[in-house]
Image: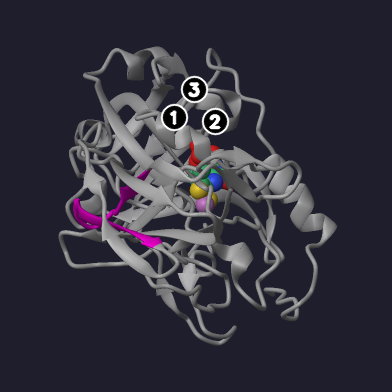
Amino acid sequence: MIEVPPAEEPFSLDELQKAVRNHGMPLEALRYDITPAGLHYLLIHYDIPATDGAAWRLDIAGNAERHLTLSLDEIRARPSRTLAVTMECAGNGRARMANRVRSQPWLVEAVGTAEWTGTPLAGVLAEAGVRPDSVEIVFTGVDHGIQGEVEQDYQRSLTLDEAMGADVLLAWAMNGQPLLPQHGAPLRLVVPGWYGMTSVKWLNRIEAVTSPFQGYQQATAYRIQMSEDDPGEPLTRMKVRALMAPPGIAEFPSTNRLVDAGAIALFGRAWSGFAPIVRVDIGVDGDWHQADLGAAPGPHAWRPWTWTWQAEPGERVLSCRATDAAGNSQPLEPFWNLQGMGNNYVQTVPVRVR
Ligand SMILES: Nc1nc2c(c(=O)[nH]1)N[C@H]1C(S)=C(S)[C@@H](COP(=O)(O)O)O[C@H]1N2
Ligand SMILES: [Mo]
């Protein structure tokens, strides 16, 4: 059952424990095209499992001509690609929602962009001879735990069409280094454009199935539901979003920012899993100005934006709002849904100008 705390309830120790284990990307790291691995956000449901690259095997089974068992060396010997991929947690933004669910309490930092190196999943599925009447491919990680009173391996599925996409990778490297334990060593799935839950870490089993997968992380979690009885809509691709690097200097331990009056070079990044970013607007106390866009480090990665603010003394609220080529833009307020998913509301940054 999903627990919904009342509106003004303070954060619980369970939420604090989740927040310290699963850190966000400090927003000053928006300066990097590719997020250094240690600054990339992290989301782990259960425990980081013990995996040993030498003993580890990947099984490919189910509705296929051949059952394959591959070692890490055999996978690394396959054709490889490196893609810059922006990844965001579907629960990003949850913490600002009134009546929030007790889960990972993200503000807005659950994002990062890494260069993932791996072999296209499609080649491995073809080698196994996945039969065309397969409707989905199920991915299983070795991590195991309990969620919603269901004991489970971490599992997600993709339709056969999505799984055969040329850019879906079985990745063994992040930013040119072997995967770190917390990011899924020795092998993970990377599904560009989708919210992070799809990119199964510590991957050790792939199975072709002939009916839609009904596992917990697919059928119960990661859905936009309005009540417990509402089956809801599944989260898939990342909704459009822009973020701003915090201007000026920080005031520890509050989140306040202090800047000197005059020209301030604001910058940040924007992404969407649906279409390229075509526009970012910067708000100053509710007046909007169009930012300049730079080049994304790749077709699946965020696009940088810049804008020069003539800061005048006083208390100001900055914001940024992205629009993609499909015409999607961000809402100004968080919207309530049971699990607090897909909350791509506009970020606001209070700043004191002196
Ligand atoms: N096996 C496994 N894979 C997983 C998870 C997990 O808990 N277990 N978390 C998922 C979620 S919800 C997200 S947002 C991404 C986070 O990837 P990262 O920690 O490398 O940033 O991993 C996904 N893959
Ligand atoms: Mo996530």
Residue at the image point whose x is 56% and y is 38% from the top:
26
Circle 1 residue: 35
Q: Amino acid at mark 1?
A: Thr
Indicate which disc, 2 or 3, sits on the residue closer to the N terminus.
2
Front in this rendered view, residue 298 or 281: 281
Front in this rendered view, residue 99 or 228: 99
Of badges 3 and 1, nearer the viewer stands 1
Indicate which disc, 3 or 1, sits on the residue closer to the N terminus.
1
Circle 3 residue: 179
Residue at the image point whose x is 23% and y is 37% from the top:
296
Residue at the image point whose x is 28% and y is 26% from the top:
119
Q: What percent of the width, then of the height, locates residue 209?
A: 34, 55
Residue at the image point whose x is 30% and y is 49% from the top:
193
Q: Is residue 239 left or right of residue 228?
A: left
* CA gap, disc 1 and disc 2: 6 Å
Q: Indicate whether residue 299 is drawn in magenta.
A: no
Circle 2 residue: 39
> Is there CB contact under 8 Å for labels 1 and 2?
yes
